[in-house]
Image (tube, rainbow, N blue to C red):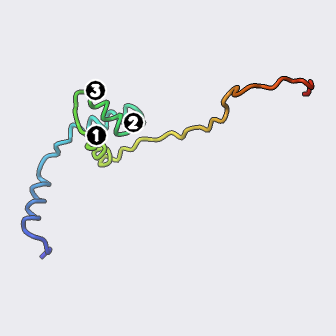
Amino acid sequence: MAGMPRSVYYYQASALSKADRHLEAKAQIHQIFHRHQGRYGYRRVHLALRNEQHYLDPKTVQRLMGQLGLKSTVRPKRYQSYRGAVGKTAPNLLQRN
């Protein structure tokens, strides 16, 4: 009736019944992300996971963070135009103010 093969139905039924194999990793990613006030992206979360002896591929961490809805907050950089004393100052020969 649905217009799909029987194998697709039974594949999806069995896939939904399986346990999430990244459940522990998701909990650790969530904990690391909120411990650093949402400033860590997937690269730094991946390094923090590696320091905790939980080895995952960086793209897996990126995918899991997307599933959890975790996105790092990028702080805007301030404009800085002052460079200090650049070059040589000419002598004040005319004593002008």
Q: Nearer the viewer, residue 51 or 22?
A: 51
Near mark 2 (Cα within 10 A), the count class, few <14, some 14-19 or many ≥20, is: many
Of labels 2 and 1, the one closer to you: 1
35 sits to left or right of 63: right
CA gap between label 3 and label 1 equals 14 Å
Q: Say what secondary structure mark 1 lies in.
A: helix
Q: Say what secondary structure mark 3 lies in.
A: helix
Which residue position is annotated with label 1?
58
Placement of 89 over or under 29, stated as above or below: above
> Callout 2, which amino acid?
Tyr
> Callout 3, which amino acid?
Asn
User: Earlier along the polypeptide chain: callout 3 or callout 2?
Assistant: 2
Which residue position is annotated with label 3?
51
Q: Residue at x 9, y 70 (%)?
A: 5
CA gap between label 3 and label 2 equals 14 Å
Near mark 3 (Cα within 10 A), the count class, few <14, some 14-19 or many ≥20, is: few
Q: Position of residue 6 (x, y in %)?
A: 7, 68
Q: Position of residue 25 (x, y in %)?
A: 23, 37
Q: Quadrant of residue 1?
A: bottom left
User: Earlier along the polypeptide chain: callout 3 or callout 1?
Assistant: 3
Q: Residue at x 13, y 59 (%)?
A: 12
Q: Nearer the viewer, residue 41 or 38?
A: 41
